Amino acid sequence: MGTLALEFPLELRIVPSLTFALALALAACGKGPPAQAPTAPPATTAPAAETDTAPAVEADTAPAADADTAPAADADAAPTAEADGGLAAGPVAAADEAAARALVASWVKAQNDGDFAAYMGLYDASFKGVKRTAKVGATEYDLAAWRADREKMFSAHMEVAAEIAAVAPGGAPGTTAVSLVQRWRSGKYADHGQKVLMVRADAGGVAKIVGEEMRTSERGWEDSKIKPSDLTGMKAPLTLHAVVERKQPPPDAMQDCLAGTLRLTVEDAAGGKLALEVGIVTGMALEDFRALTPVAPGAGGFYEELGEFCAGLGEGWRVEKDGDVLVATDVWNDEDTGEGKERHVLAQLPARAAVKFE
């Protein structure tokens, strides 16, 4: 996947970086250096020997696994990641940070081991949570309801990794906020995104999870390769052409499926050209092989190539102009997790540029 990026509100799975937000807060209070763009933090990951979904925040589908969760705001119960912004300025005591990191490591291990009892043992009795999906919206859970919902996640083997980005004081007294990137997969489904765990010591001094929020979620285990292209320097009007490119399989290959890649060519009024790679399009392996298959535009100006269902998965794309950006929507149908879609910004266009789909 080449030139896309995600720049949408929570329903579309994207919010500002928690790490960068923390840096800004620290700088404002004089507790740290000037805020800079986040860099990759040390990772606390699943053991290599262990082999979404976490239901997606937007993705029109949400497998019952790790349903975008967010702690509910309840002043009389557990402090949540939303309280006072979730992260407060100032340092965290070394002992509190060590306890929070150890808790995250145990949380990851319990999920990779499929140990539901150990997993639930990490949650405080005061825990309140909210599960969000595109179809249902927000649903609030107490610990008992959370247990019933999470138990379904442990019915199948899963792999989880957590890369801690920041440990900071929580918005409520006595809490520590752990910002991390969670990676989750089970079967054919995988996703990753920013999560905040709110941690507080119980009466016995043991660190427990009192709040949890999945702030962003993106399909796939790895970080997206989709980055936005800047077309603002091109001269309008712009003309687009789309093709699906497939590679010839070996002569002796015995395969029913043959995926391709949707590619766009952008031409401007001055003769300039730019190639954009959109993403994978599933399909059948046909005797009449064609390396390049043109995609005809739809009425009103868009491309839609949704692929063919093969070996349990159908996936394709819809490309259209939305204001001054070119948008690509990934559309899929997985026999395990159902149907879903995810929207990406493909390119920034010149202001008010006319765009023709050919």
Image: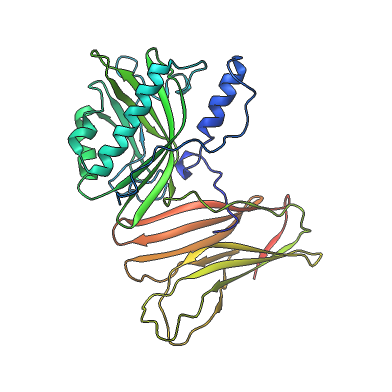
> Residue 300: horizontal and vertical position, in percent?
59, 64
Question: In this picture, is 264 found above or below 129?
Answer: below
Residue 9 appears left or right of 112: right
- Which quadrant would residue 302 be assigned to in this image? bottom right
Number of callouts in the render? 0
User: In the image shown, does 326 or 152 lie closer to the viewer?
Assistant: 152
User: In the image shown, does 77 or 46 lie closer to the viewer?
Assistant: 46
Residue 198 shows in the view: no
User: In the image shown, does 24 or 349 lie closer to the viewer?
Assistant: 24
- Which quadrant would residue 326 be assigned to in this image? bottom right
Residue 306 appears left or right of 80: right
Name the quadrant of the C terminus: bottom right
Question: In this picture, is 148 found above or below 259?
Answer: above
Name the quadrant of the N terminus: bottom right
Residue 113 appears left or right of 247: left
Residue 32 appears left or right of 68: right
Question: In this picture, is 84 found above or below 187?
Answer: above
> Residue 262: horizontal and vertical position, in percent?
54, 67
- Which quadrant would residue 28 be assigned to in this image? top right
Residue 177 shows in the view: yes
Extreme residue in the right direction: 270
> Residue 271: horizontal and vertical position, in percent?
79, 67
> Residue 331: horizontal and vertical position, in percent?
44, 59
Q: Residue at x 40, y 43 (%)?
A: 57
Q: Residue at x 34, y 46 (%)?
A: 55
Question: What's the colour scheme?
Answer: rainbow
User: In the image shown, does 105 or 155 lie closer to the viewer?
Assistant: 105
